[in-house]
Amino acid sequence: MKILIVGGNGTIGSKVSSHFSKKHEVIVAGRNSGDVIVDMADSASVKALFEKVGPVDAVVCTAGEAKWADFDSMTEDDFYIGIKSKLMGQVNLVQIGKDHMNPGGSFTLSTGILADHPVLMTTSAAMVNGGIHSFVKAVCLELKNNIRINVVSSGLVEDAIEHYGAYFPGHNPIPMTKVVNGFVKSVEGAGTGKIIRMYDNC
Amino acid sequence: MKILIVGGNGTIGSKVSSHFSKKHEVIVAGRNSGDVIVDMADSASVKALFEKVGPVDAVVCTAGEAKWADFDSMTEDDFYIGIKSKLMGQVNLVQIGKDHMNPGGSFTLSTGILADHPVLMTTSAAMVNGGIHSFVKAVCLELKNNIRINVVSSGLVEDAIEHYGAYFPGHNPIPMTKVVNGFVKSVEGAGTGKIIRMYDNC
C-alpha cells in the first residue's frame, strides 16, 4: 500500500510511520518536516499535497493542534485555532483527499481521550475531538468506491508522559505499541465509521 | 427563576418556553423574533443580549443552525455555517453568559441524535453536535459559583416530522413532552456535564 501519513514525524506519527514502513510505501507529510510540507489548516496547501503525492491507498493523520487554557481565559480566536487545525484540517484532508484515494482505500484520523473524558483546560481540545468523532460516523455513510474512514482516539501515550502527564491525574499511560495497533486496525482492517478507543482506564 | 431562552420561538423552543412560563419568568431571545433580538453567531450581539437582560438563573439554548448537504458538495465555508452558529454560538453563550449568571444557575444547550447516529447529508450537523457534547463535558469541570451545564440531545421530534421525517428513515418520533422534560431535568435538576439523550430507537 502507498500510505500518506500527515504528522508522521510527531510523537505518535513517528511510531506509526516506522511501523507501516516495514511493509508499505510511506510518505510523511508535516508542517515543518517530512517528505512533503503541508499546513493542514490551509485547504490550498492540502490540495497541493495531494497533487504532489498522487493517488494513495491510505491517509493517516496524526497531526492537528488545539489551544489548552483555562476556559476563563479562552477567547473566540483561541477556539478557532483548534477549529481550523485539528477539526477542519482533518475534514479538509478527507474532503480533498477522497478524490486522490484509490478504491477501497482508507482514512484514519486522530483524536484523543479528551472527547470522552476531558481534563482541565481542554474545552477546545475536547470539543474538536468530539466533533471529529461525529464527523467520522456521518461521513462514512457517504464515501464512495468502498473508501473507509475511522478515527483512533488515544489516551495519554507513554511517549507523552513527560510533557502531559501532570495534566492527566490518574490516567494509565498507553503503550505506544497499542496506539500503533489502533492505526493498523484501521488501515489493514475492514471496518469503517469506527472510533477506535485506545485507552483502558475510564 | 429568571430563564433566558435563546431560540425560544422555534419548533422546540416554543414548547420549552411555554412550559417554563407556567412557573418562571421567561425571556425569549431570537434572531428574528422574541423579547430580545440576538444573533448567537456574533459575540458582540451575545454580549449586548446579556447586558440588556441582566443576571439570570438559567440560560436555555434551542437555537443554532448547520448546513445539510451531500458531503461531496460541502465546501469549507458550508462547514463554517454550523461552526459559527450551532458550535461557537453556543460556546459564546456560555463564555459570555457565565459572567451574567447567578450562583447556582445553569446552562442547557441543544444538539441532536445526529451526534451519535447521523443520517445522510449531516457531516456538518453531526460534527457540531458532537463537538458540543465534548465541550459540555469539559467546561463543566471549570465553571465556578456552582454553575451547571448540560445539553439536551433530541431525536426526530414529533413537531418536525413533516419537514425532516424523510431524512430519518426508521426513526421513532419523540413526543414534545419528552423533549421538554429533558430541559426541565437540566434546569430544575441538580446534574451537570450531562448529555440528556431524548431518543429511544437506537
Image (tube, coloured by chain):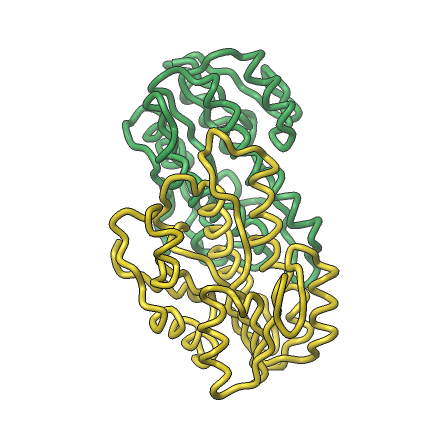
Chain colours: A yellow, B green
Kindly tell me whether residue B11 is visible in this rendering.
no
Q: Quadrant of residue A198?
A: bottom left
**B62 is higher (above) or lower (below) than B134:** above
B7, B109: nearer the viewer: B109
**A33 is higher (above) or lower (below) than A190:** above
Looking at the picture, how far across and down is residue A131, in whole percent? 50, 51
Residue at 59% across, 73% down: A28
Looking at the picture, how far across and down is residue B133, in whole percent? 43, 44
Looking at the picture, how far across and down is residue B87, in whole percent? 55, 40
Residue at 36% across, 17% down: B103
Horizontally, residue B177 falls left or right of residue B119, namely left
Horizontally, residue A96 falls left or right of residue A163, namely right
Q: Quadrant of residue A56?
A: bottom right
A116, A6: nearer the viewer: A6
B145, B16: nearer the viewer: B145
Residue at 72% across, 62% down: A45
Q: Which quarter of the figure is the N terminus of chain B placed in?
A: top left
Residue at 64% across, 71% down: A98
Kindly tell me whether residue B14 is visible in this rendering.
yes
**A49 is higher (above) or lower (below) than B29:** below
Looking at the picture, how far across and down is residue B191, in whole percent? 29, 32
Q: Which quarter of the figure is the C terminus of chain B placed in?
A: bottom left
